[in-house]
Every structure is written in C-alpha cells, then in structure tokens.
Image (cartoon, rainbow, N blue to C red):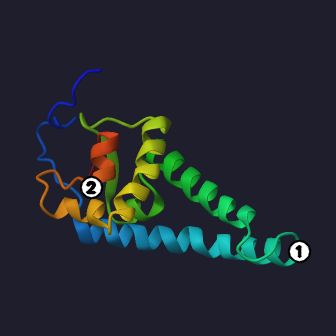
Amino acid sequence: MEPIKDYEPIFPDRPVVYGTFWERFAASFIDGIIIGIPLAVIKYFTQHHFWGRNSAETNLLNLVVNWLYSALMESGEGQATLGKRAMGLKVTDMAGGRISFGKATGRYFGKFVSAIILLIGYLMMLWDDKKQTLHDKMAGTLVVKA
C-alpha cells in the first residue's frame, strides 16, 4: 500500500484552507437537524405502529440513515453533506480529489472511534497542522474550504 503523501491541492494557485473546529461543529449541527427531523417523524410512526421504543430496529434505522447520508454525500459530486456545503467545506483525499464510497464509509465509522475516546479523536484537529481528526487520519481524508 502506498504511503499517504502531503496534501497537494488540485488548484496550486490557491492556498489550501482547512476547515476549522467551529465550522465543522456547525456543519455537524446543521446535518443533525437535517437528518434528525425526518428521522424523528419516521421513528414516531414506526415505534407506535410497528416497533417498540428503543428497539434494535430503531437503532439500526438510525445507524443506516446516518451512514448512508454521510457516505453518499461525501463521496458524491459535491464532496460534502448539506451541513458542510452550508459552511463552505468539502471532504477530499490527501491529494485534494474526491473520495470513494468505501473511504467515506470508513470515515463515518471511524467517527465512533473518535467519539469513544472521550471525544479526543475530534479534538485532535486543534493541534494538527492539517486540522485532521482521528477519523480523517484513519480514512486518509481532509476537510477543506470548497
């Protein structure tokens, strides 16, 4: 496997600007609202008509919807979830290119590792030169200004 090289922007005439902690936090908040409201409606009807509260099906639905939203949007043409787009950010590979669905999937599930260690995986970006979180490092991705 080829080692990850330093980031070389696709547009070398423009400087690379990495997404800040607060921009990424705001993007996650926006995404939470975008996903949360429709999911809450779906959960309400399924819990009252089909499944019980806090059932395995409800948790699985939540996981699958969040995973597909993140992975499909970040590996798609826009390279960003709606929250990231609103904040002017996009997800790239280490060379500034579009990431694959597999890499976006790895990045999404890597967020659980970033969170489980007392959120230190997220806070790592505060002292990293490229503003990478642990899940960014694991997936070989960057979050940059679009």
Image quadrant containing the N terminus:
top left
Q: Is residue 146 visible?
A: no
Q: Is residue 78 left or right of residue 17?
A: right
User: Residue 117 location in percent, x, y?
Assistant: 33, 63
Determine the secondary structure under disc 2: loop
Above-or-below relation of 90 to 76 = below
**Amino acid on which disc 2 is placed:** Thr
* Residue plotted at (88% across, 74% down): 49
Residue that lies at the very extreme toward the front in this rendered image: 117
List the residue tagged with mark 2.
133
Amino acid under label 1? His
Tag 1 residue: 49
> Residue at the spot x=39%, y=65% of the render?
86
Apparent side of residue 43 relative to residue 65 in the rendered image (left or right): right
Q: Is residue 45 left or right of residue 140?
A: right
| Residue extending furthest toward the top | 1
Residue 139: image quadrant is top left
Are circles 2 and 1 on residues that touch, CB within 8 Å? no
Of 130 and 82, nearer the camera is 130
**SS under mark 1:** helix
Q: Toward which corner of the image does residue 138 lie, by quadrant? A: top left
Residue 38 x %, y % = 66, 71
| Left-right relation of 9 to 136 | left
Q: Position of residue 76 (x, y in %)?
A: 48, 42
Please tell me how crowded label 2 is: few (under 14), some (14-19), or many (20+) other residues with Cα within 10 Å: many
x, y percent for residue 59 = 66, 64
Q: In this rendering, is residue 142 above or below 101?
A: below
Res 30 label: none
Tell me how far mark 2 sits from mark 1, CA to CA.
40 Å
Q: Residue at x 47, y 61 (%)?
A: 82
Q: Residue at x 17, y 54 (%)?
A: 17
Mark 1 crowd level (few <14, some 14–19, many ≥20, 10 Å Cα):
few
